[in-house]
Image (cartoon, rainbow, N blue to C red):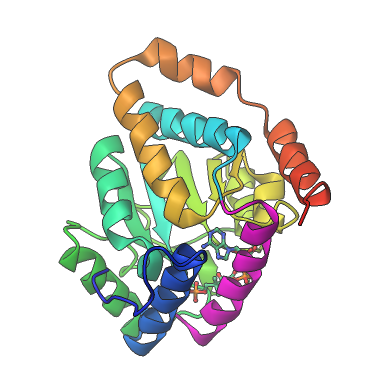
């Protein structure tokens, strides 16, 4: 996103102020829901407690996520209003490097917002954005996130789910899919049930996954090793420990 904030890069909270500004601009453009502002506040609090940096354990999770995306038959990156506003270019790059598809999937679903997000992703270089057909449903969910494309998330074996504290990750798991979740709150429902919980800010996590994917591409043995050595429970425990042990 190119809109800039009038905060110097030297400001100690530059990154979080930039992030907040992107969400605000997302709401103004009709990309992000008003609830997205609240979600941003929740995320910022956890980022603060985690030291506003990618921990070693989050980096290992990002590597495992990259390996799953590369070795998938059909990988899809789910995009909501917060993810689109924060990292549009980075999501397109991740999709390019891993061969994953992008699908818009919203909790506060409106046709206008779906189209605004798809347009925004295309402005940032995406091709063939999914989510507009919504001709299939994830079984067991009675809200709008259940609506998916039959040749997108419904058909995928690996789905990256960013920034949602809800029941969809579990429902995707019940469909036999591998879920990769980006969420700063290790107690949020989605990372708790994810195959790979990546407890990190999406603005750092997506570029980190892409970096690992570049390195792991064309090396199935290294991909397998990244998957086999990853321990989801240990990753969540590590994030919780960090939060408990934070010092001023
Ligand atoms: O665009 P829509 O209509 O699909 O709605 C999107 C929101 C984000 C409002 C909705 O899907 C939602 O689930 O919001 P919640 O319940 O507040 O959950 C968002 C989760 O993302 C929380 O656990 C936050 O801690 C986390 N989060 C917020 N910002 C970030 C984040 N995690 C990583 N990076 C962030 N920048």
Q: Is residue 39 magenta?
A: yes
Q: Residue furthest top?
A: 221
> Which residue is drawn at the image coordinates 47% and 75% (left, top)?
20
Q: Is residue 189 left or right of residue 184?
A: right
Q: Closer to the camera, 193 or 11?
A: 11
Magenta stretch: give its range.
32-52
Position of the C terminus, as image quadrant, is bottom right
Q: Is residue 195 magenta?
A: no
Q: Quadrant of residue 86?
A: bottom left
> Which residue is drawn at the image coordinates 28% and 18% (left, top)?
218
Q: Closer to the camera, 240 or 193?
A: 240
* Residue 143 makes an appearance in the image: no
Ligand 1 found in image quarter: bottom right
> x%, y% of residue 132?
31, 70
> x%, y% of residue 213?
35, 31
70 lies above or below 99: above
> x%, y% of residue 172?
58, 49
> Which residue is drawn at the image coordinates 54% and 40% (left, top)?
177
Q: Is residue 197 left or right of residue 244?
A: left
- Judged by its main secondary structure, the magenta piece is helix
Q: Is residue 237 left or right of residue 86?
A: right
> x%, y% of residue 1?
27, 68
* Residue 124 makes an appearance in the image: yes
Q: Quadrant of residue 46?
A: bottom right
Q: Residue furthest right?
A: 244
């Amino acid at each position: 996103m190119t809109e800039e904030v009038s905060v110097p890069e030297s400001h100690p909270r530059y990154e979080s102020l930039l992030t907040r500004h992107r969400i605000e601009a997302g709401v103004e453009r009709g990309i992000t829901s008003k609830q997205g502002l609240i979600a941003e506040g929740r995320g910022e609090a956890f980022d603060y407690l985690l030291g506003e940096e990618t921990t070693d354990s989050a980096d290992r999770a990002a590597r495992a996520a990259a390996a799953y995306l590369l070795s998938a038959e059909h990988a899809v990156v789910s995009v909501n209003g917060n993810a689109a506003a924060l990292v549009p270019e980075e999501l397109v790059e991740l999709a390019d490097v891993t061969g994953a598809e992008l699908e818009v999937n919203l909790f506060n679903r409106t046709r206008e917002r779906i189209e605004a997000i798809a347009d925004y992703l295309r402005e940032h270089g995406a091709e063939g954005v999914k989510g507009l057909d919504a001709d299939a449903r994830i079984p067991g969910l009675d809200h709008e996130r259940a609506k998916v494309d039959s040749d997108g998330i419904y058909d995928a074996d690996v789905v990256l789910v960013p920034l949602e504290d809800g029941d969809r990750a579990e429902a995707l798991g019940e469909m036999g899919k591998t879920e990769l979740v980006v969420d700063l709150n290790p107690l949020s429902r989605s990372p708790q049930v994810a195959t790979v919980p990546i407890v990190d800010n999406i603005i750092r996590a997506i570029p980190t996954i892409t970096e690992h994917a570049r390195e792991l591409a064309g090396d199935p043995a290294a991909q397998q090793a990244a998957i086999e050595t990853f321990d989801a429970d240990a990753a969540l425990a590590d994030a919780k420990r960090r939060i408990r042990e934070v010092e001023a």
